[in-house]
Every structure is written in structure tokens, then in C-alpha cells.
Amino acid sequence: MARPRIALAQIDTCVGDVDGNVEAVLAWSRRAAEAGAHVVVFPEMTLTGYPIEDLALRASFRRGAQAGLERLASRLVEEGLGELTVVVGTIGERRLGPRNDAQADAAARAAVRATNRAVVLRDGEVLARYDKHHLPEYGVFDESRIFTPGHEVCVLDVLDRRVAVVICEDIWQDGGPVTALADEDLSLLLVLNASPYEEGKGHVRTALAARRAHEVGAPVAYVNLVAGQDDLVFDGGSFVVGRDGQVLAYAPQFVEHLLLWDLAEDDEPEVPGPRAARLTADEEVYRALVLGLADYVRKNGFRSVVLGMSGGIDSALCAAIAADAIGGEHVVGVSMPSVYSSGHSKDDAADLAQRIGADYRVQPIAPMVDAFQGQLHLEGLAEENLQARVRGVTLMALSNAEGHLVLATGNKTELAVGYSTIYGDAVGGFAPLKDVDKSRVWALARWRNHAALDGVFRPDEVPPIPESSITKPPSAELRPGQVDQDSLPPYDLLDTVLDAYVENAEGRAELLARGFAPEVVDKVLQLTDRAEWKRRQYPLGPKVTALAFGRDRRLPVTTRWREL
Amino acid sequence: MARPRIALAQIDTCVGDVDGNVEAVLAWSRRAAEAGAHVVVFPEMTLTGYPIEDLALRASFRRGAQAGLERLASRLVEEGLGELTVVVGTIGERRLGPRNDAQADAAARAAVRATNRAVVLRDGEVLARYDKHHLPEYGVFDESRIFTPGHEVCVLDVLDRRVAVVICEDIWQDGGPVTALADEDLSLLLVLNASPYEEGKGHVRTALAARRAHEVGAPVAYVNLVAGQDDLVFDGGSFVVGRDGQVLAYAPQFVEHLLLWDLAEDDEPEVPGPRAARLTADEEVYRALVLGLADYVRKNGFRSVVLGMSGGIDSALCAAIAADAIGGEHVVGVSMPSVYSSGHSKDDAADLAQRIGADYRVQPIAPMVDAFQGQLHLEGLAEENLQARVRGVTLMALSNAEGHLVLATGNKTELAVGYSTIYGDAVGGFAPLKDVDKSRVWALARWRNHAALDGVFRPDEVPPIPESSITKPPSAELRPGQVDQDSLPPYDLLDTVLDAYVENAEGRAELLARGFAPEVVDKVLQLTDRAEWKRRQYPLGPKVTALAFGRDRRLPVTTRWREL
């Protein structure tokens, strides 16, 4: 008997694009078959994309997915791929009683609830189905809201070997289907995943899979989605761990990939497969941001982006990411100098645009600011915000007139403490640096320039970010001589306090116990709490840390809670 | 033995304001004792406010609530209220193992999980505790995310009568604690609630409580929160239903209230209590909007609001609501005419402001629009949006300079089809009409004017809304002669299609089967789907229907799903 060859098809699906996802499964199944695979496994909810959120509650959507599955089964046979065992994710349905009395008047609809399903296709038939048991409802996840859990395990035969299928969260919880599979004498456990990226998560996943491999006494093949989807990035990085927990094969992150691996006999030594190089932390985050933006642009039908280029580090890094995502020729950079803008700001912006090959424009804001001031006579903060808002209106006008996606260039630190102007620099459809704190912004800028010298992206590349954008003191340039550190603690301190307060949910007492000065702690906490209403109206941006602002951190705007 | 007198204290708590909520419980307990009550019951999560969202995940927050509970217990005794049985809601804690492996590195924190708890206080002691069993995770709720469920029932003795306590969702689910209480020979079931308002929900609640009364063979006393909290309004309307399901007592909606009711002996006829008049549908919705805005303003520390007054029906209704919520003298109305504004628009705006006693200002936008156009030369939609954005910048400038909360005046129909300008008329901290469709806007305006003639709010009041704002054809006045119906189906048809598509989640096939014309259906669905990104950045506004945009309807921005 031949060794089963397992193909992990790490593909970039699109939410709601059932037809496109079916075509992708066909194309990658063909590649798998051509590579001699017996089984090809796709990521969680392949046909629907992930996460589909409340689309799951629409009967018409579920019908569309079911039709897609049936079309896929026929097409596989028509294209001579019937013998291949194809494992895809989709949305399933279960008939239940009404969910609760509030919905009793909609009993007919409530009687059907959706599941997060894996389907095994062979010879045009559904060989097996599996409904995900554990529905995560922490962090960015809302699966209990939209799915009902499954309760059965799923084991199939592939070339007389016993192969089980589970889905994502099922391996993150102790107990559940993996424990139930321990006595099933498995040869392989397949896991379909849509596991959102956060820095360093790859190691957590392989360690976890190693524990499950030990539990079932069989290798674990873990296939992960690769995609940008709104505020999430799925990084791929699919892998196989052996019975002893060693990583036997590893796919690259952030690209579509077919990882091939041969399943040895149960009494034979396991066979290693290809192992992609691991990325450094900075490269990993940078590439996550590039994929997040590239997929947002492409999947939403844009072809170009526009952003304000201030000469500062945030807009410079954003522009570099945009150029890597969609090509510098599709990036429009607008310098919008005011009377407070320094000469080096304009020079640095022009330099950046030239380095990345952007369409560069200069649009002074004085005529519009003067027109407002002639009527409104604003001072102080109101005047500062006015400048930012005139820039926002200008970018939106270019977007309306020319069709570009507007990028908001603010970073996570700014968003935390509210140092952005709502309807000003906060305008945009997407905010690439939303989950990147200021300290990391500098690190990524330096990494990207080094990568240019090392030829990581392309040969003979000029470092995209002007050195002076990296080294000069950060300033919003909204009044004469202003620099950020006039009114904020140094960024390294600020980012450390924010990390403890926001990501680790530490209270004031814990922060003081760590040795932070009370005046720093109180200022940071007050600024952060007060900015919640602005964060609610901020554009989407890709999550790259353990806790991003947005659906990962759901706090009331109206609250009198103050850490004391 | 005396009949136990039950007090349902329908109070307006504030999220995070533990000190303030403790003081409110003390004050209303005193009132209850003075009225001869033996038991006083407060709404769900009294001490913390509701919903607290991810504040529940902060250990410091849970410590603060616990300290508040201990202070309350002592203060009740100090103030001579020790004999009163006080039932309050708060956040509890349970020690558990780590929730999942992803959080295993934070095992120390994960070992403690929060509960949604009721606590019974008497003589300065905690007499009983109850942790909510059923944690809703549909609609606007995310309770599984932040709480772990309880599994025990809670029965206490009050004057030798057996009284059980459950919380909100516990009675919305069949089975669970109420079923477990059926054999407990109860004399009364107390239910602590924070049940968000939606039109007509009062009848659903009493019908449900009647079923539970039948199940346990005892009356049900249902106390509901009254509060505006971000995008939710809690309407109060607390009540008691008898063993046979009849409503015995009913508190008014939208105001704090102490509802008193005497529990007869089990073999005696039940005693009716006070019954507030039921509101009409329009009055109910209108008062919900007023409370939602009033509490948002007060709890967030504002004292005034500013809004654009166009002379149209949306801004007129918004202004009337604002005047009812905080007083017309705290409302700033700004007419911002453009070259396309009609004379009647300016007249109607001035008339409205005068009727409600608002601070009225006129700020022409031509100088600013001309300044932008001198630089950008915009046409078509870009030019229309520019006008709206200049108005948005103007309102935000007044807010920054003078401290007013900016109100966005758009309605649910506009928000559905994307007929608002992001960063233009969509700017604001709060949007009173966010969940009110255009048809309802007219109905509410007419109702409010009739209410003035009937002296519902105050005697001898002039109808606040100019008749011509109600009767004229709606227009954004962004180009010459423009009216909404140039590019949209008639509003009654549009609102019917939107109701089916958005609130009932019907697909295109179901809509066509209902007889709607394909070209109308396709246009409405396309407009609605494309506007999702703008809805994400829209201000909060109060939910008054079964399904509001926002956390009630979570859809991806990036999706290629199209109903076909």
C-alpha cells in the first residue's frame, strides 16, 4: 500500500465569494492531484470565507454555500479529480427548536441553525461531515452567536488509514473531540483552521498541535487560511507535527502554498517534509500589514490608495507598506503643508514618494484654513483640529473624484491616547498601522530599509523610507515648534504602560506596583479611557498583536469607571 | 403574619459608576422602607451598570464592584435599613481552570472568571447569591464572552414565604433555573433585568413572565433597568404577573420608579397593584429616543448639543428630541446654507429654533466651499460631499471651541442605503435617529406636534416642528432642484423592502416572491451592502427596533456575497 500523500492547500479565500472559492478549490485540487496527493485539505470555511459573521444567519447565504458545495462535488468528478479525497470547510445547517422565546415568532427560521462544517468529498459524493464542537466567543470571535455546535467525531479511511477531521478551536480546548479521538487508533489528525495572525502565534500553534498529537498518538496536519479580511490577517504557516511533537513540515507565511507531506506507516519513522524559513518578528509583522492591506484593496475592488504624506514616520511607513502591497505606482501621496509645516517635512515627503514611485502631489491647505478662520476665528485645539480636518476633506475629495481608497496613517499609540483628530487624520477606509505602536513603527521602518539593502523584496532597491523621517523628533506640526513629547511621556515608556493597561488589562494598582510613576499612569489611563468614542469611529486596520482595538476589546463609551 | 410588600426599584444606573450606583441603591432602599416594603429588588447588575462589556475582564473593576457591595451592606445597617431584604445585581467571580490554551500563559488571570450575579443583603450580611445561568450571545449581547454561567438555584425566605431569584435571560430560555424551581413550592419569583427596549417588547416580556408564573405556580415580579447606555435604551416598565398570568401591577416606562405590590397568602386571591397607562407605539419610541439622548449627554459630562438645522424633517425631529431631553436652551442649531439651499429651508430652520428656544446661528458655507473649489475643482458627487463635509468641519469646530456634543441627524433609511456623507452630515458623537426609518421620522414628528397640542409634555406648548418641514418633499439640497426621490424609491416602499432585507434577513428570492419589483430590490440590496464601511464609522445611536445597525447586525465590510 502506498503512503498517503497529504496536501495542505493554504489558500486565500474571500468572504462571500462562493463561486471564486469553489474555483480556487478546483485549481488547487488539480495541483494537489498532479503532485501525487491522495488527500487535499483546505482551510476552515473554505467555500464561504472566514469570518462570515452574521451572513451565517441568512438562509439565502446558506443556500448559496450549499449550491457551491454541490457544484464543487460535480466539477471535481468532471475534471477527473474524483479519486482525490478533498476536505473543505463550509457552512452547514442543523434543524433545532426555536432558539428562545424572543425569536419564537420567527420559529420557522430559528428552527434551522448554522454550523461551522468540514465536508469530505470523494467520487462526487459527500463521504463525511463534521461540525465544529468548540465555538470561540473570546477575543475577535463571535461563533456562538452564529453557529450551533456539533457533537460527533469524524473519522474516515484513506488508503486503509484512519484519518480524523476537526476544526480550529477544537484543538485549543482541552477535552472535546480530540480527547474523544484518543482511542480511535488514528494514523492522522487533520485540522482545518482560520487562525488570525498575531505576533509569535506560530509557536503557540505548533506547541498546541504537539500536545494533541501526543493525545491521539498520531501526527497532526494543520492547514491555515492565508488572507486579509477586514481587521484580521490569516498568516498561513500551515504545518505537520509528528507523534512526538516535532515539526515535520512547515509552509511559508502570508502566501498561498501547497504543502505536501507523506504519511508513513504507523510503525515506520515519520517522514520530514519541506520546511519554510521562519521569519523574524519584524518581518512577520511587516508582511502581515502588507497582506492585510493588499487583500483589503483587492477584495473591495480598489486599485489605488491615497494618503497624506507629512514627512513623518507614520505616513512614510504606511506608504512603504502600500507600495509593497499594490505597487508604488498605485499609491497617491499628498503633501498638505500648512504655515506650521517645516521645510524638511515637505522635502522628506517628496523624497519618500520618489523612492517608492508614488504619484506625488502638493496641496497647500492655507486657502481653505483661512476661509474657515475668516468665519470661525478658532484658537488652540480647535484651530489644530481644523488643519487636520481640512486635510481630511482634501483626501476624501480626491477619493471621491478619482476612486482611491483613503489610508489613515495613525498608529496604535495615537489611537490609544486619542492623539488623532477625528474626521481629520483619522479619515479613511483602512488604517494599516492601527495595531502597531509607535515603538514598533520605528522598528518596522528600520527593518524595511534594511530589507531593501539585503534585497529581500527586490534586487537593487533603494531603502524606501528617508532616514530623516526615522530620526527626527515626531511632531504633528499643528502649531509652531510642536513635538509629541511636549504633551506625552517618551514613547518607549508610553508604549510599555499602554501594553500593560490595554493588552494585559492591568489596573492602576498593578501599574504602580510595577514602578511606573503615578503621574504617568494617571495621564495615560485618563487619555486612553476618554478616547473610546473616537476609536469607535476609526477605520478598520489589521490586528497584529494579542489585543487590537476594535472587536478584540469591547468597552462602553459611556462609563464612569476610573482606575483609582 | 403580614403580607410581604415587594418594592421593584426601577432605577437609572450608570456603567462603571459603582459609588453613584451604591448611593442610588441606598436612597431607593430608604424610600422602599419608608413605604413599608419588606423586600426591594433592583435591576440586573445594579452596582456596575449594564452592559459593562469587557470591563468584566478587568480584575481591578471586579475589585471595585466587590468593595462597593461591602460598602452597601454596611451602609444599609448604618442607616437603619438592615431589616430590609435588598436584592441587587453586581459582578461576581468564580475560580476556574485556564479557559483555553491560548490564554494558558495568563493562567493566573484566567483562573478567575466573572459572573452576572444577584446578591441578597439583610442585616449587613450576604444572605444568598445567584449567578445567572443563561448568558445571551445573540442580538446586542455578548455575555458568554465575559461571564461564566451559574448552575445553582437561589431560594430565600421572606416572612416565611419562599422567594426565588433569577436574572433576565434565565426566563427567556425554556428549561434552566425556572424549570428547576417548579418543585420548590415558591410563593414568588423575582427577576432582575436589563432588557433593552425595542418597540412593543413590553408585551413580549409580560407574556413570557406569564408562562414562567404558570411553570412555578407563583407570581413573577419583573424589575427592569431604566437607562440610556450608548446604543441601548432600557425602558423600565417593571411589572408583576399573577399565577394565572394576569398583569397585577405595571410601572411607567422611561422614568425611575418604585413599584409597590403586596404578596398575598398562597391560598388568597392575588392583590392588584398600581398600573401605569400603556404608551402608544409612537410615544414609546419617541420617549426612548429622548431618554437615550438625555442619558448619553448627562453620563458623558456634556451640557449642550449642537446640530445642523437644514429645515428638513430629520434635523427638526432631532432638535425636538434634544430640546425634550436637555432643554431647548442647551441646544445650538446651526443653519449652514449653500448656494443650493432654498429660502424655505432657512425660514423653517429659524422657525424651528425659535419654537424650541434653541441658540440659533447662521453660518454660510460658500466661503469655505469656494476655497476648496479654487484648489480642487470638484464636480458631481465629490462636490456634493464637499458641501456636507464643510458643514461637518464647521459643527466639529463649534464643538471643539464651545464643548457641545455634536448630533448626527441621519435616519435609519439613509444609513441603510448609504445616503449620508461620511465625515459630512455623519459627523457626531451621537445619532438620535440612527434606528428610526424615514417613514417613522414623519410619524414621530406628527406625533410630537400633536402631543404639544394635547399638552403631553407641558401646558400651552407650541408644536415644535414647522408644518412645512413635515410636508415638503425631502431633499439634501446639494444640487439645484434635487429631491431624494430622484434617486431612491418612494420612502414607504423603500422602508418596507429594507425591513424585509435588514430586520428579517430575507434574501432576494424571498423579496421577489413577496412581489417587490426586481429593479427596486436589486437597487436597495446593492446600496445597502455597499454602505457597510460607512456604517462602521457612524456614531452611536439608540436601538428602538428589533434589529438596529451596529452590534445587533455584524457583517463583514469585505464580502463579495451578493443576493442573486
Image (spheres, coloured by chain):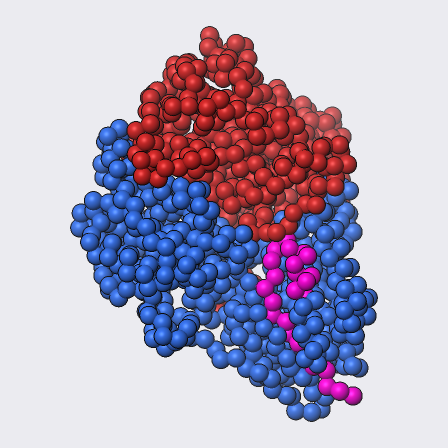
Chain colours: A red, B blue
Left or right, A174 with reference to B542:
right
Q: Quadrant of the N terminus of chain B?
A: bottom right
Q: Position of residue B527 (x, y in %)?
A: 33, 48
Which residue lies most toward the left here?
Answer: B481
Q: Tell me, yes or no, if residue B361 can be seen here.
A: yes
Q: Is residue B549 above or below residue B43?
A: above
Residue occupying image coordinates x 56% and y 21%: A442
Which residue lies most toward the bottom here?
Answer: B268
Residue occupying image coordinates x 44% and y 42%: B400
Residue stretch rendered in magenta on the structure: B1-25
Left or right, A491 with reference to A345:
right
Q: Nearer the viewer, residue B421 or A457?
A: B421
Q: How many marks?
A: 0
Determine the image quadrant of residue A355: top left
Residue occupying image coordinates x 39% and y 75%: B459
Q: Position of residue B436 (x, y in %)?
A: 39, 60
